[in-house]
Amino acid sequence: GDTAAREALDALTQELAALQAAERRDVARQAALALALAEAHLAQGAVEAALGAAQQAAELSRRCGGEDSRGEAAALRLLARAAQKAGRPEEALEALRGAAALLGARGERTEQLTSLQAAARPALPAGRA
């Protein structure tokens, strides 16, 4: 009785964990595809489409939790590039700050510095960036 119930509970718990892990992998794959789509849109000059796909990639990466913070940072950096091309510097700056914060939390100082430099570049006088 008690052993059978415990085994059934363990089996259900393991099954749920496996399904959740599979879902996270699926969401991470969707995020990677959305990021690739955003890159393609930006390369074609479709800035608004790039903005939408980059935002979607960031949101999907966020759903993966801390597991895909690097993917979220990449999406935010691409979002910043698209926002800059769309003439929306405040949105670009916000995205770069978000990317820098995520990278800093991961201990990726070089990548964090790159994002911070990109965020500062529009504010610097010409010839200083």
Image: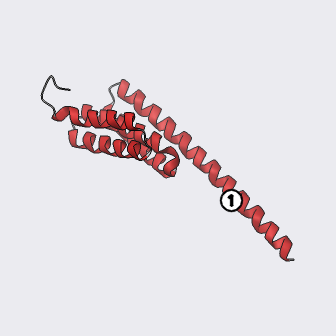
Please state the horizontal and vertical placement of residue 37, each as a whole percent of the image.
45, 32
Task: Please name whichever residue, 5 or 50, is drawn nearer the observer in this view of the structure.
Answer: 5
Residue placed at 25% from the left, 41% from the top? Answer: 93
Secondary-structure class at tag 1: helix
Q: Which residue is mark 1?
A: 16
The answer, for residue 77, to whether it is visible in the render is yes
The colouring scheme, among rainbow, by chain, secondary structure or one colour, is secondary structure
The amino acid sitting under disc 1 is Leu
Please state the horizontal and vertical placement of residue 76, each as a whole percent of the image.
37, 40
Report whether 113 appears left or right of 67: left
Residue placed at 50% from the left, 52% from the top? Answer: 65
Task: Please name whichever residue, 119 or 56, is drawn nearer the observer in this view of the structure.
Answer: 119
- Answer with the quarter of the image where residue 122 lies: top left
Q: Quadrant of the N terminus?
A: bottom right
Report whether 68 appears left or right of 76: right
Above or below — where is 103 with respect to 1? Answer: above
Q: Residues within 10 Å of mark 1 (few under 14, many from 20)?
A: few
The answer, for residue 53, to whether it is visible in the render is no
- Answer with the quarter of the image where residue 113 lies: top left
Residue placed at 31% from the left, 40% from the top? Answer: 96
Report whether 5 appears left or right of 94: right
Residue placed at 38% from the left, 34% from the top? Answer: 111
Please state the horizontal and vertical placement of residue 45, each as a whole percent of the image.
32, 26
Please state the horizontal and vertical placement of residue 22, each as a whole percent of the image.
64, 48
- Answer with the quarter of the image where residue 14 lies: bottom right
Task: Please name whichever residue, 72 or 32, is drawn nearer the observer in this view of the structure.
Answer: 72
Q: Please tell me how many numbered marks the rendered image carries.
A: 1
Q: Quadrant of the C terminus?
A: top left
Toward the left, the furthest residue is 125
